[in-house]
């Protein structure tokens, strides 16, 4: 559903965090049948950061603190914490509540949201809705993932793609903020990108124990889905904002595969230079991809007041979405 936004919000702080350990393509070539050339040619990825103890919560806290520092806010001033993740260490309590505790954000409502790689966009739209109604004055929106624990490291079709990390933005009421959005779900295609569910084991029913939960993906189907639906979704969001694609200064896409980004730019008829990337350095970080890249662009001075920026992504579910924001 496409939606024209009423009311305003602004991003006043961004932050990101990556594990210290970098894993180069050559290291993976020693584990599975692949090569640096093969990975770069098919994905555009050269390295990724992999946890050696960092967690969804610890990375989220680090990214959140950076966003709060830039926004010149204390944790006690935070009204709402939304954490997008599909790789939490614990089911209970939710990761957002653990982040709240570690930050000392004693006045904040906190909960998790799972829409896989689209999670940050869905969380951003949710936070914006809270701010529009006046329920809250501000929000920390975080995407944090430690996907490395969900990867089959003997499967070269997935282990080469993913990295760990977290990104955060601090939103405040006021400003021109989100101009339009389009968010979608297609559960009928859910098994194209999935992680095996848990078996049912209780006092009254015993399913056969399942193998370890690993991400499984039909890469060709995901590619076809993304290159077809993401340009359409971006068009819907831009139209809802009352703009055209020519009015957009930057397109910050989910960093899944450079070929997908190239194809989206071509289908939209937009110069590829408007599509910044960082996947060559960090790989696919699921819900963290967009906020980490946004933080990098912000801190590099590539985002200017008044810039119109599209954020767009897709992921398991299948889920996909786009939003248009005016940088304040």
Image: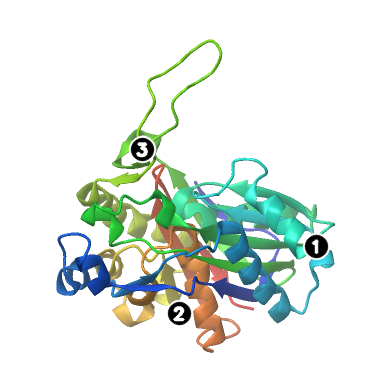
Measuring from the top left, give residue 166's x and y in whole percent.
54, 65
Measuring from the top left, give residue 23's x and y in whole percent.
34, 72
Mark 2 or mark 1: name the one nearer the start of the chain: 1
Q: Which residue is mark 1?
A: 104
Q: Classify 10 Å Cα crowding around label 3: few (below 14), some (14-19), many (20 and above).
A: some
- Mark-to-mark CA distance, 3 and 1: 37 Å
Quarter where residue 58 is shown: bottom right
Q: Which mark is residue 210?
A: none
Q: Which residue is mark 3?
A: 190
Measuring from the top left, give residue 234's x and y in whole percent.
41, 60
Mark 3 or mark 1: name the one nearer the start of the chain: 1
* Residue 4 visible in image: yes
Quarter where residue 250 is shown: bottom left
- Mark-to-mark CA distance, 2 and 1: 37 Å
Residue at the (39%, 72%) spot, across then down: 282
Q: Which residue is mark 2?
A: 249
Q: Is residue 268 above or below residue 113?
A: below
């Amino acid at each position: 559903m496409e939606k024209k936004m009423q009311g305003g919000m602004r991003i006043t702080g961004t932050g990101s965090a990556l594990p210290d350990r970098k894993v180069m393509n050559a290291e993976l070539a020693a584990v599975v049948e692949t090569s640096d050339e093969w990975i770069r040619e098919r994905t555009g990825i050269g390295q990724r950061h992999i946890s050696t103890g960092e967690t969804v919560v610890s990375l989220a806290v680090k990214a959140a603190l950076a966003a709060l520092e830039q926004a010149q806010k204390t944790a006690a001033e935070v009204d709402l914490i939304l954490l997008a993740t599909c790789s939490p260490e614990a089911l209970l309590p939710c990761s957002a509540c653990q982040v709240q505790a570690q930050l000392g954000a004693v006045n904040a409502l906190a909960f998790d949201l799972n829409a896989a790689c689209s999670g940050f966009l869905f969380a951003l739209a949710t936070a914006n809705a809270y701010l529009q109604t006046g329920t809250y004055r501000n929000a920390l929106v975080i995407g944090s993932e430690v996907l490395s624990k969900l990867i089959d490291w003997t499967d070269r079709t997935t282990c080469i793609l993913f990295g760990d990390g977290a990104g955060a933005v601090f939103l405040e009421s006021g400003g021109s903020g989100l101009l339009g959005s389009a968010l979608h779900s297609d559960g009928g295609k859910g098994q194209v990108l999935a992680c095996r569910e848990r078996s049912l084991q209780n006092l009254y029913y015993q399913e056969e124990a399942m193998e370890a939960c690993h991400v499984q993906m039909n890469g060709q189907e995901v590619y076809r889905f993304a290159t077809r639906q993401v340009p359409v979704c971006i068009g819907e969001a831009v139209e809802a904002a009352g703009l055209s694609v020519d009015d957009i200064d930057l397109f910050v896409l989910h960093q899944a595969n450079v070929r997908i980004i190239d194809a989206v730019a071509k289908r939209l008829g937009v110069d590829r230079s408007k599509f910044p990337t960082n996947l060559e350095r960090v790989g696919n970080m699921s819900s963290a991809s967009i906020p980490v890249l946004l933080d990098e662009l912000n801190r590099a001075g590539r985002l200017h007041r008044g810039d119109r920026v599209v954020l767009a992504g897709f992921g398991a579910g299948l889920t996909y979405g786009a939003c248009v924001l005016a940088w304040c």
